[in-house]
Image (cartoon, rainbow, N blue to C red):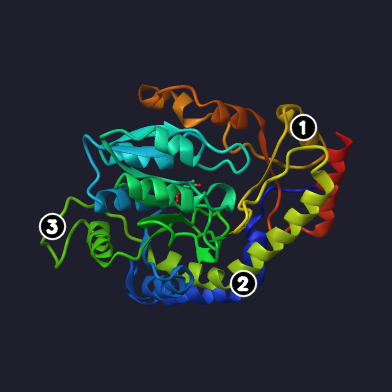
């Protein structure tokens, strides 16, 4: 049996007629950037992340950058980020002219450790970026308590977490501002580059909306040095079609996670869901000290698996100047984490086969 990690074409197959119609609408609309299709998509996502409101962006990395710029974070400022996340969480801080400060993560959730966050605060700290890694929200009550005590802004990196909830509240509405990614492999993926910014703060929303379009409002009057951070019409149109499937896809991922939990919890460390969280399993990530051998064993049996992420940020060649103390949990999970296939388009038999092979290993 073959088990691919992700088959995006299979995801589109049952939606093809609606996707083609959406593309056709844009093709004949004379509006190819932002426009009515992006506005309609924004309104649809607004329902999911209320009380936040959303802005369609060029991608998740740019959404993080615009969130930072919108908050006025720049040279001289520090922003605390977890050491175990995708590179863009930290690179956006540097692009904004500020300095990332890495903090360790929680062993069980892979998310920012609130105590490590508090310990990393200095007089120059302006904000924190908790990442909802793999589709599970960070410990936001504890993080918010620390942030409020020290007067810090909270930027959620919800790139992997649209549809997740935290004590009944939606990811991307838990901090001051949030960034979401629609990179094609995310649970909700565009057919190219796309992302989203969300905030419930009307003044910040306005600044970010203007920053998205060259800092310009009205035409040829530039208030800020923004950029071209706009979403394409075609992405908004296709994303709105796919958004209708997101809840059922996330539900299917949860069913597969239950199968893996039951089959694997005796042989490897299976994901821990913090009480109050609904996980959307962007990744189902196990831990084992024999990670590399297991990955090879699975590959020999037709099973794809991925390592997110093999190198913690403070160990990246271009980020070493920002590295402080060692981050032992980040280093340990980077050596032990392995993400298993969990796409909604896989069959239960394929999931059982993956579990069989891991048990045999
Ligand atoms: C995907 C991702 C991003 C970047 O999103 P892009 O749309 O690829 O720019 C940022 N942070 C995390 C945690 C991600 O997974």
Q: In the image, what residue occupies the spot 43% across and 57% down?
A: 194
Q: For mark 2, what is the residue?
A: 15
* Mark 2 secondary-structure assignment: helix
Neighbourhood count class around disc 2 (C-alpha, 10 Å): few under 14, some 14–19, many 20 upward: some
Q: Of the residues under marks 2 and 1, which one precedes in the sequence?
A: 2
Q: Of the residues under marks 2 and 3, which one precedes in the sequence?
A: 2
Closer mark to the observer between disc 2 and disc 1: 1
Q: For mark 3, what is the residue?
A: 223
Q: CA distance from mark 3 to mark 1?
A: 54 Å
The image quarter containing residue 180 is: bottom left
Q: In the image, what residue occupies the spot 73% across and 33% down?
A: 295
* Percent position of residue 28, x then y: 39, 77
Lateral position of residue 242 relative to residue 351, left or right: left
Mark 3 lies within 8 Å of ligand 1 (Cβ measured): no
Q: Is residue 293 visible?
A: yes
Q: How many marks?
A: 3
* Percent position of residue 5, x then y: 69, 48
In the foreground, 161 or 123:
123
Q: In the image, what residue occupies the spot 72% across and 42% down?
A: 304
* Mark 3 secondary-structure assignment: loop
Residue 144 to residue 118: above or below: below
Q: Which mark is residue 81?
A: none
Neighbourhood count class around disc 1 (C-alpha, 10 Å): few under 14, some 14–19, many 20 upward: some
Q: Of the residues under marks 3 and 1, which one precedes in the sequence?
A: 3
Q: CA distance from mark 2 to mark 3?
A: 41 Å
Q: For mark 1, what is the residue?
A: 294
Residue 5 to residue 210: above or below: above
Q: Is residue 344 visible?
A: no
Closer mark to the observer between disc 2 and disc 3: 3
Q: In the image, what residue occupies the spot 22% across and 34% down?
A: 76
Lateral position of residue 248 relative to residue 97, left or right: right
């Amino acid at each position: 049996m073959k088990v691919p990690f992700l088959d995006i074409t299979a995801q589109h197959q049952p939606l093809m007629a609606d996707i083609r119609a959406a593309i056709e609408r844009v093709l004949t609309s004379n509006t190819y950037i932002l426009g009515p299709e992006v506005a309609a998509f924004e309104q649809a996502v607004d329902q999911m992340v209320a009380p936040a409101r959303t802005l369609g962006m060029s991608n998740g990395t740019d959404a993080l950058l615009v969130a930072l710029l919108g908050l006025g974070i720049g040279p001289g400022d520090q922003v605390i980020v977890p050491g175990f996340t995708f590179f863009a969480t930290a690179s956006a801080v540097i692009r904004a002219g500020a300095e990332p400060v890495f903090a360790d993560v929680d062993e069980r959730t892979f998310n920012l450790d609130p105590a490590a966050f508090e310990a990393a605060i200095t007089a120059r700290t302006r904000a924190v970026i908790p990442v909802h890694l793999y589709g599970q929200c960070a410990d936001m009550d504890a993080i918010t308590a620390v942030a409020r005590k020290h007067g810090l802004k909270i930027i959620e990196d919800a790139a992997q977490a649209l549809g997740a909830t935290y004590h009944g509240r939606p990811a991307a509405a838990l901090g001051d501002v949030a960034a979401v990614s629609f990179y094609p492999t995310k649970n909700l993926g565009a057919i190219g580059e796309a992302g989203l910014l969300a905030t419930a703060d009307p003044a910040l929303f306005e600044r970010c909306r203007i920053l998205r379009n060259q800092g310009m409002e009205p035409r040829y009057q530039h208030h800020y040095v923004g950029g071209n951070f706009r979403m394409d019409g075609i992405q908004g149109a296709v994303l709105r079609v796919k958004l209708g499937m997101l809840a059922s896809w996330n539900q299917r991922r949860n069913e597969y996670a239950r199968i893996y939990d039951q089959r694997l919890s005796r042989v490897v460390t299976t994901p821990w869901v913090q009480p109050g969280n609904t996980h959307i399993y962007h990744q189902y990530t196990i831990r084992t000290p024999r990670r590399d051998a297991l990955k090879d064993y699975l590959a020999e049996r037709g099973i794809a698996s991925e390592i997110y992420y093999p190198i913690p940020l403070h160990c990246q060649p271009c980020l070493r100047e920002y590295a402080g103390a060692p981050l032992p949990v980040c280093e340990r999970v980077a050596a032990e984490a392995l993400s298993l296939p969990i796409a909604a388009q896989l069959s239960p038999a394929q999931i059982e086969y993956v579990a069989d092979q891991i048990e045999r290993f």
